[in-house]
Image (cartoon, rainbow, N blue to C red):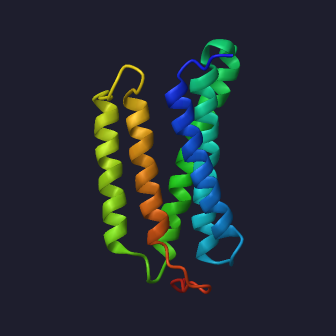
Amino acid sequence: MMLAEPATALTDYLLAATCGWFAWRLLARSPGTRLLWGLGFACLAAAAATGGTFHGLRPMLPPGSLSLLWNATLVGIGSGAGFIASALLVQRSGVSVRGLRAAGGITALALVLLALRIGIHPQFSHNDVYHCLQWLALVILYRSIPRTADLKTRNP
C-alpha cells in the first residue's frame, strides 16, 4: 500500500510521537499545571496522528471517514492549544519567556509558509515544511516548561 502523501503523513506521525512522549512525561510526574500541559500535548499528539492518517490514506478512504478524520484533527489542534494556553495562564513562574518567544516566532513563520504554500521540493510540500517547523517549536515549548515537581499556580 502506497501512502498518498508520504512525507506529510510521516511528518505528522513524527509530531504525534513527539507530542505523545511529551504528554506521557508530563502526565506521569505530578498533577497541577503539568496536567494542563500534558493534556495539551496529548491532544496535539492525537491531532497529528489523525492528520497523518488523513494525508496518508486519503484516496483509500470514503468521504465520511475523511471528514471524521479531518474534524478530529481540527478539534485536537484547538483543544491542545486551549490546554496549553490555560497552562500558561495559571503557571505562576518558571516558564522560559525566551523559549515561549522562540516557539511562537517559529510557529508564526510556519503558518506564513503554510499560507503561502511554500515547500522545498515537489515531494516535500508546504505541509511538510510546516510540520517540521512546528515540531521544532513544540520541542522548544516543552523545554520551556519548568521541571520542578511542584508547580505553583496563581490563586483564584
Quadrant (top left/top right/bottom left/bottom right) for the C terminus: bottom right
Left or right of 144, for residue 46: right
Q: Which residue is drawn at 63% across and 16% down?
A: 2
Q: In which quarter of the image is residue 152?
A: bottom right
The correct choice, above or below, for 91 with respect to 38 in the image is: below
Q: Which residue is drawn at 31% across and 71% down?
A: 98
Q: Which residue is drawn at 54% across and 25% down?
A: 6
The correct choice, above or below, for 56 with respect to 147 in the image is: above
Q: In the depicted view, which residue is nearer to us: 149 or 72? A: 149
Q: In which quarter of the image is residue 39?
A: bottom right
Q: Where is residue 112 in the image (x, y as percent from the top left)?
A: 28, 39
The correct choice, above or below, for 109 with respect to 51 in the image is: below
Left or right of 105, for residue 83: right
Quadrant (top left/top right/bottom left/bottom right) for the N terminus: top right
The correct choice, above or below, for 54 with respect to 46 in the image is: above
Q: Position of residue 132 (x, y in %)?
A: 42, 43
Q: In the depicted view, which residue is nearer to us: 129 or 37? A: 129
Q: Residue at x 70, y 22 (%)?
A: 65
Q: Where is residue 54 in the image (x, y as percent from the top left)?
A: 61, 26
Left or right of 100, for residue 81: right
Left or right of 101, for residue 86: right
